[in-house]
Structure formats: structure tokens, C-alpha cells
Image (tube, grey):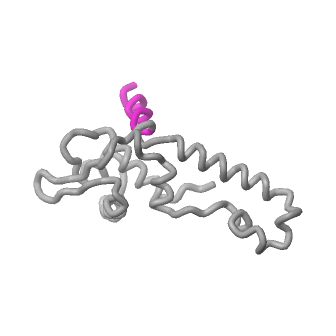
Amino acid sequence: MRIPMKVDYGVRALVELALHYGESPTQTAAIAAKQRIPEAYLDQLLSTLHKAGFISSRRGPHGGHSLVRDPAEINLGTVVATLEGTSPPLDCLIWPDECLLSSTCAQREIWQEVEETIQKILGSTSIGDLAQRQYRTTKR
């Protein structure tokens, strides 16, 4: 499974905002520098995250971006679905009747298990969890 750059950068931006949760808004340039995300691309992602209700944004010299709710309440599965949509590894997992081999396919069950496991992990991991991990690794 390959993680799209949009998801990688979007999650990194949310983690950076989680590290500053409850503080004054964080400017785009600061997020871009800390997380090594191209600022122009980050602007697009922040707009998407704002429209989806993950962050609030304020213009001006004291403006920036903040998480709308506690980072522990934002699960990774919702973020990934917002940024990339939901797409299982094989179309037959969505439309089994469309595949002539679906009922006898040796690999279909495995890919279903893979998808279920991924969704379980993403659903049980919060942006807060990732922020804590990042905090611990940067304080070593």
C-alpha cells in the first residue's frame, strides 16, 4: 500500500497543529518549515482541512491555523478519507458481483482482511497519538 503525498503532508500538518493545540494560531510558513512541506501545496491542503472542519483559519499578522477540536478526537481514518477518499485495494471488494471469479478467488479474502486491518488501525489512531509520538522523538 502506498500513502499519497497529499495524505502524508496533510497528516503532518495536523500533527504540527496538534503540537500547538490550545495555543495561538500557527502560521502556514511555520508549519511548512517544521514539517518540510512546500508552502504552496500546504495552502491547498489547509484549505481542504478547513472546509472539512478539522481546522480554523484566521487571516492577518496574528493569524494562522488551529485545530477545531482536541487532537485525540480526530482519527486518522477520517483524515485519510477526507484527503484521499475511500478506495479498497480491489474493486471486487466493493462490487463482488462484477467479478466472475469473486466467489472462487483465492486472494479476495486476504485483501478483505488487509483492508479491514488498515481501517481498524487508522480508526483507532488519533492525530493526538501521532503528535505524542512526534513529541517523544523530537525530545530525545
Q: Residue at x 81, y 57 (%)?
A: 107
Which quadrant would the N terminus be assigned to in this image?
A: bottom right
Q: State left or right for residue 26 relative to residue 119.
A: left
Q: What secondary structure is the magenta-colored segment mainly? A: helix
Q: State left or right for residue 79 relative to residue 38.
A: right
**Span highlighted in magenta in the image:** 130-140
| Residue 128 quadrant | top left
Q: Position of residue 62 (x, y in %)?
A: 12, 51
Q: Residue furthest left?
A: 61
Q: Residue furthest top?
A: 140
Location of residue 97 with respect to 114 vertically, above or below: below
Q: Position of residue 52 (x, y in %)?
A: 37, 61
Q: Residue at x 24, y 39 (%)?
A: 22
Location of residue 117 with respect to 61 vertically, above or below: above
Q: Residue at x 72, y 49 (%)?
A: 113
Does 139 lie within the magenta span? yes
Q: Position of residue 57 (x, y in %)?
A: 23, 57
Q: State left or right for residue 90 relative to residue 121.
A: right
Q: Position of residue 108 (x, y in %)?
A: 79, 58
Q: Residue furthest right?
A: 104
| Residue 19 quadrant | top left
